[in-house]
């Protein structure tokens, strides 16, 4: 069980010598929703890859429960990318079942989740027959079917129209409230971060380091275009006018 995560990265170098992360530290508690905001090319996706265990070539460590390397702890984790990454030759149901082991492959659980994400009746449809928003719903269903302790999302609602994105944000919050994974959510949108997260971590331009760790002390539910979210965003921009460009 993941009760806490401690990320300490002194340096992340790529094979071409480019340093994308330097002196970055983040700690989270169980079930916390953390948004990561920073300029393009800052190293946010690289950071998600490190947390997920996909990239272990770092000077530093990612620990669970203060002592154990997170990659060595047995846990379910899910990664939701900018694109749904569905297999076009598989139906909606088969795309979701793809991440399940034979022991986990329970028809009832899949069917229940299909209903929760608004995909009931689409079980036997192929991805090419779905809208972009519906494909994102399949991606979320696939992420949550394993009941992850750790959920990583890399701008999952990018390029969607705002009503569709809002529906999916609400769906994401319903599912996280139910399953309570620890969440790292990368976004460029300040409003999205404030509307969704318990904390917003702002990182600098490359190489990424934390320049502000901001707790969002607003009651839920929050409206992305609501007055409270607007006030928080305006206050941050007034106090830190260069924040989104990666300057403290």
Image (tube, rainbow, N blue to C red):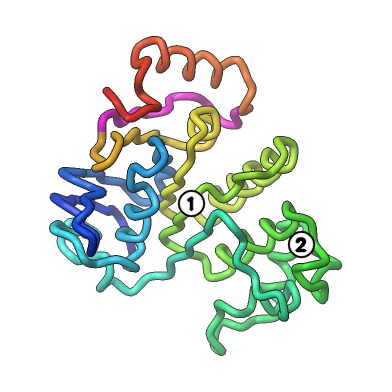
- Asked if the stretch drawn in magenta spans residue 46, the answer is no
Q: Position of residue 24 (x, y in %)?
A: 20, 44
Reply above or below: 18 against 196: below
Q: Is residue 102 left or right of residue 86?
A: left
Residue at 23 percent across and 53 percent down: it is 18
- Asked if the stretch drawn in magenta spans residue 214, the answer is yes
Sequence order check: which comes first, mark 1 or mark 2?
Answer: 2
Reply above or below: 99 against 119: below
Residue at 53 percent across and 37 percent down: it is 196
Q: Quadrant of the N terminus?
A: bottom left
Tell me whether circle 1 and circle 2 mark residues in contact (CB < 8 Å): no
Q: Position of residue 40 (x, y in %)?
A: 41, 40
Q: Position of residue 234 (x, y in %)?
A: 48, 13
Q: Please, which residue is most extreme toward the front here?
A: 16
Residue designated by label 1 = 154
Residue 62, visible in the rendered structure: no
Q: Please, which residue is most extreme toward the bottom here?
A: 102
Residue at 69 percent across and 57 percent down: it is 137
Q: Secondary structure at mark 1?
A: strand
Reply above or below: 15 against 197: below
Residue designated by label 2 = 115
Q: Is residue 48 left or right of residue 148?
A: left
Give neighbour class at mark 2: few <14, some 14-19, many 20+ (Cα, 10 Å).
few
Q: Which mark is residue 236?
A: none
Residue 77 quadrant: bottom left
Q: Mark 1, mark 2: which one is toward the viewer?
A: 1
Q: Write the start and end of the magenta stretch as one range.
A: 211-222
| Closer-to-camera residue (71/28) | 71
Reply above or below: 80 against 105: above
């Amino acid at each position: 069980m993941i009760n806490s995560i401690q990320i300490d990265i002194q340096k992340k170098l790529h094979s071409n010598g480019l340093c994308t992360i330097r002196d970055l530290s983040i700690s989270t508690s169980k079930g916390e929703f953390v948004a990561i905001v920073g300029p393009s090319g800052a190293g946010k996706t690289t950071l998600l890859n490190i947390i997920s265990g996909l990239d272990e070539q770092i000077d530093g460590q990612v620990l669970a429960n203060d002592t154990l390397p997170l990659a060595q702890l047995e846990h379910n984790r899910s990664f939701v990318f900018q694109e749904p990454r569905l297999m076009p030759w598989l139906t909606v149901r088969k795309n979701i079942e793809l991440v399940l082991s034979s022991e986990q492959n329970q028809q009832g659980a899949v069917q229940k989740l299909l209903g929760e994400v608004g995909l009931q009746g689409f079980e036997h449809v192929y991805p090419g027959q779905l809208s972009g928003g519906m494909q994102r719903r399949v991606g979320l269903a696939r992420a949550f079917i394993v009941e992850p302790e750790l959920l990583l999302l890399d701008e999952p609602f990018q390029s969607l129209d705002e009503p569709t994105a809002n529906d999916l944000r609400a769906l994401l919050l319903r599912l996280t409230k139910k399953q309570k994974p620890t969440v790292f959510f990368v976004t460029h949108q300040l409003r999205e971060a404030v509307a969704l997260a318990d904390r917003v971590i702002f990182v600098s331009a490359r190489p990424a380091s934390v320049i502000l760790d901001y707790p969002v002390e607003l009651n839920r539910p929050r409206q992305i275009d609501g007055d409270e979210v607007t006030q928080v965003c305006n206050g941050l921009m007034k106090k830190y006018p260069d924040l989104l460009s990666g300057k403290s």
